[in-house]
Image (spheres, rainbow, N blue to C red):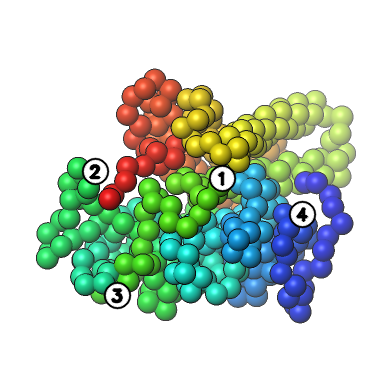
C-alpha cells in the first residue's frame, strides 16, 4: 500500500471529503481499524453499525456523484484505488463499500430532480441484486413489485435497494421493445420496504451481509426505475452502462496486497529471509500481483482517456473493450491464486481462524463465485473479439434500448 499522511477518521469528523486524494487518504487511514475488527465483522456476518459510519465517513459512498451534483466525481480508477484501500483492511468492508458506492452512479440513470429527491445526502448507500428475480406488474404511475432476491450485499445497512424484475401487464409477460419475449427493469425502493432474510452463512465474505431479501407488493413510481440503456441525467465517463462494475477489482487487489504484506512480514519475523522457497514464492506472487494490477488500471485509464475526450465505448478497439471485463475476472482469480500459494507457504500456522490468511483464503474463494469472475466473462470477451454473440454483453457496456 502507498503510505500517505492520513487524515483523521473519528467520531465528530463530519467534514465531507471532496477530492480523490482526501477520500483515498481517509480510506487508507481507516484500513488498520478495519483490520483490527475483521474477526468481529466476520462473526457478525455484516458490518456493525459503527463500522458502517466509519466507512461512510471516508466518503466512499459519495465518490460516484458528479461534480454538478456537488459530488467529487472520482474517475473509475480513483474509485478502484479507494476500494482497494478499504479491502486491504477488511474484505467484507471493502465489498460493502464497493456496492454502496454505486448510489451516485445510478443517479445518472434517473431524472435529475428525482435523483436529487431520492438522495438528499451524497453519503447514502445502495444495495440489491440487478438480475431480474422479481415480478413487476405494470399499474398506473408505476409498478407493483414482489419477489425474493439473493446476494443483497450491504442490504443490512443500505438506504435504497435496487432490484431487477420481469415486467407483467395484467398478469401476462410484457415483451421488450427490442423483441425480447419478456422485458425487465430495475426498481429502487427505500430500505424500509424491504425485509431482510438472514441466509448469509457462507464459506467467505461473511462480513458483507449479503443476505436474501424480499419485497412484497410494494408500489414503485415509474420515476424510481432505470435501465442501463437509458442515461437520463448524466454525462461523461461515469454515465455509461457498465460503470457499476469498474471498481470491483479493487476488492480483489486489496486482499491480495494485504496477504502479500502479511506473509512478507511474517517471513521476516520468522527468520526466513534467506529461505529459497519463501523468496521464490513471494517474488512469484508479487510478479502476478503487479501485472494483474497494471492490467486493471491500464484498462481503466484507456477507457477514461477515450470517454473523457468525448468518445464512446464503441470507440475502443475490440481488444481494449474486452480488456475491461477480462482484467476484472483476472484480478479475482489471481487474488485467489496468490492467497492460496501464500497459505501453502505459511503451512500449518495458516489453518487456524485467528490467521488472516485463513479468512482471506475463504474470502477470495467466495468472491470468485461472482459472475464477474466466471467463465461467462471469458466467453463474452472472446465472442466480442471474434465478432460473435457475447453471453453477458453488459460486461462490455453493450445494451439494447427498451424504448
Dot 2 or dot 3, earlier in sequence: 2
Q: Is there a contact, CB below 8 Å, between mark 4 and mark 2?
A: no
* Cα–Cα gap, marks 3 and 4: 41 Å
**10 Å crowding of disc 2: few (<14), some (14-19), many (20+):** few
Q: Relative to residue 196, is residue 171 drawn left or right?
A: left
Q: Is there a contact, CB below 8 Å, between mark 2 and mark 1?
A: no
Q: Residue at x 53, y 36 (%)?
A: 311
- Location of residue 198 (image quadrant): bottom left
Q: Residue at x 32, y 46 (%)?
A: 401
* Cα–Cα gap, marks 4 and 1: 19 Å
Res 218 label? 3
Q: Residue at x 40, y 27 (%)?
A: 384
Mark nearer the viewer, 3 or 4:
4
Res 237 label? 1
**10 Å crowding of disc 1: few (<14), some (14-19), many (20+):** many
- The residue wearing badge 4 is 21
Dot 4 or dot 1, earlier in sequence: 4
Q: Is there a contact, CB below 8 Å, between mark 4 and mark 1?
A: no
Tell me the element at label 2.
Answer: loop
Tell me the element at label 3.
Answer: strand
Mark nearer the viewer, 4 or 1:
1
Residue 291 x, y percent position in the rendering: 67, 29
Number of numbered tags placed on the structure image: 4
* Cα–Cα gap, marks 1 and 3: 34 Å
Q: Is there a contact, CB below 8 Å, between mark 3 and mark 4?
A: no
- The residue wearing badge 2 is 178
Dot 1 or dot 3, earlier in sequence: 3
Judging depth in this view, the residue of 193 and 398 nearest the camera is 398
* Cα–Cα gap, marks 2 and 3: 27 Å
Amino acid at each position: 500500500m502507498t503510505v500517505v499522511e492520513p487524515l483523521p477518521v473519528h467520531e465528530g469528523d463530519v467534514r465531507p471529503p471532496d477530492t480523490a486524494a482526501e477520500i483515498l487518504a481517509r480510506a487508507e487511514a481507516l484500513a488498520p481499524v478495519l483490520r483490527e475488527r475483521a474477526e468481529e465483522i466476520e462473526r457478525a456476518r455484516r458490518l456493525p453499525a459503527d463500522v458502517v459510519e466509519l466507512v461512510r465517513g471516508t466518503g466512499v459512498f459519495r465518490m460516484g456523484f458528479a461534480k454538478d451534483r456537488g459530488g467529487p466525481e472520482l474517475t473509475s480508477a480513483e474509485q478502484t484505488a479507494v476500494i482497494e484501500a478499504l479491502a486491504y483492511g477488511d474484505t467484507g468492508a471493502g465489498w460493502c463499500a464497493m456496492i454502496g458506492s454505486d448510489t451516485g452512479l445510478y443517479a445518472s440513470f434517473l431524472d435529475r430532480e428525482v435523483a436529487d429527491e431520492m438522495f438528499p445526502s451524497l453519503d447514502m448507500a445502495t444495495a440489491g441484486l440487478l438480475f431480474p428475480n422479481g415480478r413487476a406488474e405494470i399499474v398506473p404511475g408505476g409498478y407493483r413489485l414482489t419477489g425474493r432476491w439473493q446476494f443483497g450485499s450491504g442490504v443490512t445497512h443500505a438506504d435504497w435497494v435496487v432490484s431487477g424484475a420481469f415486467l407483467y401487464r395484467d398478469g401476462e409477460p410484457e415483451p421488450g421493445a427490442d423483441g425480447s419475449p419478456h422485458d425487465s427493469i430495475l426498481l429502487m425502493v427505500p430500505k424500509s420496504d424491504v425485509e431482510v432474510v438472514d441466509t448469509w452463512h457462507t464459506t467467505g465474505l461473511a462480513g458483507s451481509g449479503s443476505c436474501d431479501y424480499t419485497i412484497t407488493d410494494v408500489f414503485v413510481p415509474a420515476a424510481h426505475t432505470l435501465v442501463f440503456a437509458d442515461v437520463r441525467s448524466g454525462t461523461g465517463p461515469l454515465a455509461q452502462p457498465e460503470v457499476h462494475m469498474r471498481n470491483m477489482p479493487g476488492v480483489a487487489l486489496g486482499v491480495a496486497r494485504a496477504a502479500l504484506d502479511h506473509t512478507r512480514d511474517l517471513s521476516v519475523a520468522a527468520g526466513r529471509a534467506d529461505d529459497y522457497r519463501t523468496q521464490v514464492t513471494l517474488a512469484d506472487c508479487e510478479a502476478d500481483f503487479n501485472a494483474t494490477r497494471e492490467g486493471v488500471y491500464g484498462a481503466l485509464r484507456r477507457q477514461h482517456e477515450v470517454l473523457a475526450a468525448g468518445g464512446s465505448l464503441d470507440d475502443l478497439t475490440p481488444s481494449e473493450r474486452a480488456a475491461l471485463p477480462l482484467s476484472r475476472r483476472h484480478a479475482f482469480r489471481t487474488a485467489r491464486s496468490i492467497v492460496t500459494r501464500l497459505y501453502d507457504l505459511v503451512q500449518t500456522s495458516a489453518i487456524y481462524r485467528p490467521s488472516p490468511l485463513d479468512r482471506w483464503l475463504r474470502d477470495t474463494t467466495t468472491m470468485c463465485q461472482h459472475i464477474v469472475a466466471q467463465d461467462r466473462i471469458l466467453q463474452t470477451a472472446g465472442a466480442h473479439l471474434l465478432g460473435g454473440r457475447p453471453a453477458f454483453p453488459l460486461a462490455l457496456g453493450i445494451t439494447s434500448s427498451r424504448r
